[in-house]
C-alpha cells in the first residue's frame, strides 16, 4: 500500500475553522486513500469535519498530512494545493 506524507503550514487567517474543515473533508472524500491530519500529536480523519475542528489548527501551525492508498500521491497533491490556496479564502 502506497503511503506518502508531508508537513504543511496552515496559512489562512482563520486556521482550520468550520469552512476550511468542510472544504478539506469534502476534498478528502473524493479519494479512496485514507487521509490523516496530525497536529501536536493528535490525529484526525481528514474526511471528518468534526475531527478536523477538534484539532484546533490555528494560522501558523504545522500539520502532518499522511495519505495511504492507491491514489495517495494524488490526494496529497490536492490537499497541498488547498493549503497553498489558503482554502480559497479572501484574507
Image (spheres, rainbow, N blue to C red):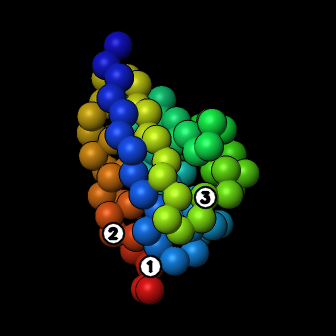
Is residue 91 found left or right of 57 in the rendered image?
A: left
Circle nearer the viewer, 2 or 3: 3
Q: Which mark is residue 57?
A: 3
Q: What residue appears at the point 53 percent right and 68 percent down from the top-left corner?
A: 59
Image quadrant where residue 19 sits: bottom right
Relative to 10, is 66 above or below?
above
* SS category of the residue bearing label 3: loop
Tell me the residue that label 1 is attached to.
89
Q: Nearer the viewer, residue 29 or 37?
A: 37
Q: What residue appears at the point 33 percent right and 52 percent down from the top-left corner?
A: 80
Q: Is residue 36 visible?
A: yes
Distance (Cα) linking label 2 and label 1: 8 Å
Q: What residue appears at the point 35 percent right and 40 percent down from the top-left corner?
A: 6
Residue 83 x/y as whole percent: 38, 60
Distance (Cα) linking label 2 and label 3: 16 Å
Quadrant assignment for the N terminus? top left
Quadrant assignment for the C terminus? bottom left
Amino acid at each position: 500500500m502506497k503511503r506518502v506524507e508531508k508537513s504543511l503550514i496552515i496559512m489562512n487567517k482563520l486556521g482550520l475553522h468550520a469552512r476550511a474543515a468542510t472544504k478539506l473533508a469534502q476534498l478528502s472524500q473524493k479519494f479512496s486513500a485514507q487521509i490523516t491530519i496530525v497536529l501536536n500529536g493528535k490525529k484526525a480523519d481528514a474526511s471528518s469535519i468534526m475531527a478536523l475542528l477538534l484539532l484546533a489548527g490555528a494560522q501558523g501551525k504545522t500539520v502532518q498530512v499522511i495519505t495511504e492508498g492507491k491514489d495517495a500521491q494524488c490526494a496529497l497533491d490536492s490537499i497541498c494545493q488547498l493549503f497553498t490556496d489558503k482554502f480559497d479564502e479572501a484574507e
